[in-house]
Image (cartoon, helix red, strand yellow):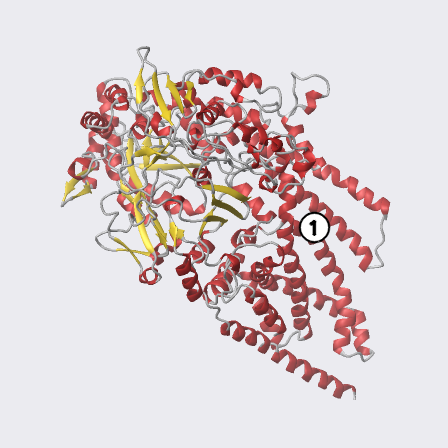
Amino acid sequence: MRLLLAAAFLLSGCGDVWNDPYSAADRGRGILYTSFVDRPKHLDPASTITEDESKFTRQVYEPPVQYHYLKRPYELVPLVATEVPSAKEAPDGTVSYEVRLRPGVRFQPHPAFHAPNRQLAPEAIARLRTPYDLPTHADRELVADDYIYQIKRLAHPRLNSPVFGLMAENIVGMKGLGERLKAAAKSPGWIDLRQHELAGVERIDAHAFRIRLKERYPQFLYWLAMPYFAPMPWEAEAFFSQPGMAAKNFNLDWWPVGTGPYMLVENDPNAVMVLKRNPNFRGEPYPSEGAPGDREEGLLVDAGKPMPFVDEVRFVREREAIPFWNKFLQGYYDQSGIPADSFDNAVRVSVEGDTNLTAEMEAKGIRLRTSVAASVFYLGFNMEDPVIGMPKVGGEAAERSRKLRQAISVAVDWEEYISIFLSGRGIAAQGPIPPGIFGWEEGPASVNPVTHEWRDGRPVRRPIEHARKLLAEAGYPDGRDAKTGAPLVLYLDTVARGPGDKPRFDWWRKQFSRLSIQLEIRDTDWNRLQDKIRKGSQQLYILGWNGDYPDPENFLFLLHGAQARMKGDGVNSSNYASPAYDALFPRMKDLPNGPERAEAIRRMVQVARQDAPWAFGFYPKDYGLSHGWLSNGKPNDMAGNTVKYLRVDAAKRAALRREWNQPVLWPALVLLGAVLASAIPAIVGYRRRERRAARAGA
Amino acid sequence: MFAYVLRRVLYAIPVLVGVNLVTFALFFFVNTPDDMARMHLGAKRVTPEAIEKWKLERGYDKPMLWNERAEGIDKATDTVFWRKSARLFVLDFGAAEDRRDIGAEIRARMGPSLALALPIFLVGLLVNVTFALGMAFFRASTLDFWGVVACVAMMSISTLFYIIGGQYVASKLWHLVPISGYGEGLSAIRFLVLPVLIGVVSGIGSGSRWYRTLFLEEMSRDYVRTARAKGLAERTVLFRHVLKNAMIPILTGAVAVIPLLFMGSLLTESFFGIPGLGSYTIEAIQSQDFAVVRAMVFIGSGLYIVGLLLTDLSYTLVDPRIRFQ
């Protein structure tokens, strides 16, 4: 009992709520509580690549432009730039973008801006816990040179930027700079990039610069919305390059320096990472316009008010879904996705396919927001394969294999897959372009006539008999070669994650068995699958693509002949090469969004549907939950800098947390009593035995 | 004794070299540096140049075991084996995939791991011995029977069930402790109460059964019969004689485990959000951070050898009949 009282005393230190994982001092403060699963590896804007990293980098770094938070389809709007730059084509074919910056934008306070801090003794560095322990912080105004410095960093050999290859193909002089820097990097120490020229990036004045591209590349604008093109002060690089900094993990990968609404002040990727409001942030206004329905949803209540609304963001490490989900339900996280295991507890899907929250969620005031991700998943056919592919010999053989691919495309019931394995979280794909991206069509025009037909106002998959007919026309009636009588055996290469994949594999076999085709599944790991695809030794494979930016080019290039994986490490894993499709691609790529581009896309999609290099799978649907005290939340697949828009009603949250988490002590006491009571028979038995022994000895 | 310890330490070196060679072969021949590069660079824009740059940056571009192009001693030292595996012997673990120093990370994570593992070990030992003594005292009675049944039932349940069930009941239903998380200093206690309790309870089944067997074996020995014949009370026989002698295998078994407590608990740390070495290891395995996995395998084998050495030493301390040879 003493132990229990001591524990109760200890827990009472947490206030009237015992299970609160946060400090009692933080209650009622405007903090946003969220989580992260995997440790971010690179917070350097030149090296960042994953979603786990952009959660942090996008709140700190500001590229010239950003995506409108509310409008759909996605639209670029200025962020630090005064306007979205437009392309100017020169007579020599080069294209330039002039970026003019808002004056008066300031970097966050940071020790790097105080000159003496860039000449620290290693012993002084060794004593620091974080760079912010240094007593003097300073800041300065953002200038065009900071953007130019960062663009040069993309060519830095030590940073291994994932976009260097792409940028070297497009920005004038980038490749040469990369080679010069490679030579310079042979000697240790900081490379001051101010001393290295980049012909394609030119300073116009203190607040403007120009980027020159080798040729037309309209999609380049989208790259200007990514952290790769965020400003980097040279002082930060000089500061972190001092001897002794690396040994303390003080570098730009861990301590970003930006102009954004937040600054990273605590970085313990094992437990918690904290963003605090940047006191120098200029106060960007909340958007005044949105998509239809946004006003009714209350998403424009804060229109025109200066952001950010939240003072601090605490990212807590949660590796397991169950504890995270339970903490969300207790109110200790403000927003959450829905773990697959808890989907039925959170959402009910009606017969019509409508999704609503369960009564338990509604009673807690939790809100559900869904959105279709800018992603596509598919079953790919290797077009270089002699059975399933597109043989160059004669039209008849090509037609046969095309019908075989079409038959499989009809037979694979993606609607069922979505229902069984995704709990309904997806839409069966009709082509390579997902909803919300220019070129995606609604209504009957959206339907892939090879696999679906428009019936009763919705696309309906064609019956299996249609697939069997196509299979027979392909020369495989009842799944056997019409000439030899040999059964048709196909091979699917896919990544296996463990025994849990068995139902999925069974499902795949079932789809093919409906056509009497034998499917052999060759489960492998990610590297082996990539290796096979590179060599073209796969027959069927399953892959997906998450869009980099909301342009149809970023999806249609997955089937562009020039991108064939076997020929040069492109992204076209099916090695599909259609003269008609490839002829339309450059035009589609260069045209602005409009009827002409829409028509080119429509024709390309039609070609792809008929040739069926993929059995178009599904576009995943994201389900997001947020508590009633969190406002302005709207899913946005493209903009990562969404924290600044969110508002938290901290008083309401504190009250509800208290109401939901009152300690229930009596069952614990009963349990303890039961454990103690279970010792009674032992005590009684012991005494009886002792007494009996005494009598026997007497 | 010193000569014995020295000899055992020298014996450990070839074992560690063997472990090192096997892990090197597994990590660099079965899974080549090119594979590692592709895994870490992701699915997009993985060009051969990017792979080469990735390898160059991490020193994986060198020959594996022998560098023909180098001169003199560099032929052996300017290789992946020397730089990535042999350096582990001087506890130079290098940097993780996220460029963080692995040694610093291990030092930081050892504390939380010990804060969890040590109480589980000590309280667990006490509870298991007590429970086993009770069953031995009431041997062949109804109490003993149900005690054994309870032990078998408890050891049949997966640890994961204890963790999820414990979190559900104590944190979700009764709101008594945080579900997961960790704090600095004394504030860590409220996060540790539940995982320690679960760790102890989940270990009762197997631990108590094992100790009960040891106690019963001791109780069938001649000296116990003699003690009883002398008229000693059962309590005295049990606590003064049986317990003392049965503690020899119990203590030596426990001593072997002590060094491994530093390695932490994979599942418990992961589910309770405790930033220890167990979660570090499992995380490295999942993210294929081979530098960390190699370091942890090496440390694990080293600690295991230390554990075995301590076991041998503890034998001599608790059993005067055993001598160093």
User: What secondary structure is found at the residue carrying circle 1?
Assistant: helix
Please identify the quadrant where the N terminus of chain A is shown.
bottom right
Would residue A372 be visible to someone looking at this image? Answer: yes
Q: Please report, as a chain letter, where disc 1 is located.
A: B
Residue A243 horizontal/vertical position (percent): 65, 30
**Quadrant of residue B24 within the rendered picture:** top right
Residue A208 horizontal/vertical position (percent): 39, 24
The kind of residue tagged 1 is Pro
Specify whether A13 is left or right of A300. Answer: right
Q: List the single residue furthest toward the left.
A: A456
Residue sitting nearer the eye, A184 or B171: A184
Would residue B220 be visible to someone looking at this image? Answer: no
Determine whether B283 is above or below B66 in the image: below
Residue bearing mark 1: B259
**Quadrant of residue B208 within the rendered picture:** bottom right
Q: How many marks?
A: 1
Determine whether A445 is above or below A563 in the image: below
Determine whether A581 is above or below A10 in the image: above
Specify whether B112 is left or right of A338. Answer: right
Residue drawn at 69 percent across, 20 percent down: B75
> Mark 1 Cα within 10 Å, few/some/many (few <14, many 20+)?
some
